[in-house]
Amino acid sequence: MHPNLIEYIKRYVSITEAEIAIFQTYLHSKKIKKKEFLLKEGQFCKSRYFIIKGCVRLFHFDNKGNEQIIHFGIDNWWITEYESLINQIPSQLNIQAVENTELLELPEAYFDELCEKVPIIERLFRKIMEKTYIAIQKRIEYIYSLSGEEQFRFFIDANPEFTQRVPQYMIASYLGMSPEFVSKVKAKIK
C-alpha cells in the first residue's frame, strides 16, 4: 500500500500491519491524465478513489450549460460520487483530472467484504464521512453568512495550495462566483 494512504489511515484509526496487507489487496492503481474523466455524467460510479498525487474536480453542468464545481480532491484525499455509488443510479456529476493524477481505486463491489475482513475500515470511512459532512455544512454556512470577498479570502486562507494548482476560473466556479469577480477580489488582496 502506498505510504501516503497508510499515514492517512493512521490519522483516523489504529490499524495493524496484517489489516493493512488485507486492505491493500482490494486496491488497484490507476493513472489519469489532465482533463481525462474518471466518471462522466450518465455512468455508474463503482469505486472510491484515494488520490496519491494530483488533483481532480467533481462537477456538473447547470441548466445554462455552465460548469458548477461541487468539490475538489487533491493529494491524500478520497473522492467519489456517493449518490451514484450508494444508490446505484447513473451519475449526474463528472469527475475529471485537473492535473495528471495517480489514484488507488477501491471498488464498491468488494467494500462490504473488505469491511467484514477488516472491520476498522468501516470506522475509517465513517470518520471520513463525518469530516466531509462538517466541511459541507461549513461551506453552506459561509455561502449564507459571508460576502463573496469574504468567502474567497476564507477559501484561499484555508486552502492555499489550490491557488497554485487550480485555475482561477475553477475556484470561481466552486465558490459560485464569476471569474471577473474573483479577479477583482484577488487584485484587491495583493
Image (tube, helix red, strand yellow):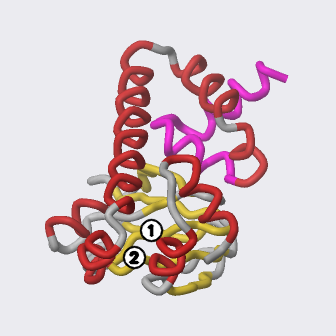
Category of crowding for the residue at label 2, using alpha-carbon neighbours closer than 10 angstroms: few (below 14), some (14–19), many (at least 20)? many
- Mark 1 sits on what residue? 95
Secondary element at image label 1 = strand
Residue 78 vs 110, above or below: the answer is above
Which image quadrant for residue 117?
bottom left
In the image, 115 versus 153, the foreground residue is: 115
Q: Residue at x 63, y 36 (%)?
A: 180
What segment carries the magenta color?
Answer: 166-190
The residue under the point 66% across, 74% down is: 2
Q: Using the rendered view, name the quadrant where residue 112 is placed.
A: bottom left
Which quarter shows the N terminus?
bottom right
Name the spot of residue 39 as percent of width and height, x first: 39, 76
Magenta stretch, main secondary structure, is helix
Secondary structure at numbered mark 2: strand
Inspect the image, locate mark 1, and give the three-letter code of the amino acid beneath it. Ile
Tag 1 near tag 2, CB within 8 Å: yes
**Of residues 109 and 14, the one drawn nearer to the viewer in this rendering:** 14
Q: CA distance from mark 1 to mark 2?
A: 5 Å
Q: What residue does disc 2 label?
A: 39
Q: Which mark is residue 47?
A: none
Which of these two is toward me, 22 or 30? 22
Q: Amino acid at mark 2?
A: Leu
The tag earlier along the polypeptide, 1 or 2, is 2
Q: Height in image: 145 above or below 45? A: above
Can residue 74 be spotted in the picture?
Answer: no
Asked whether residue 178 is drawn in magenta, I would say yes
Percent across and percent down for residue 69 are 45, 51
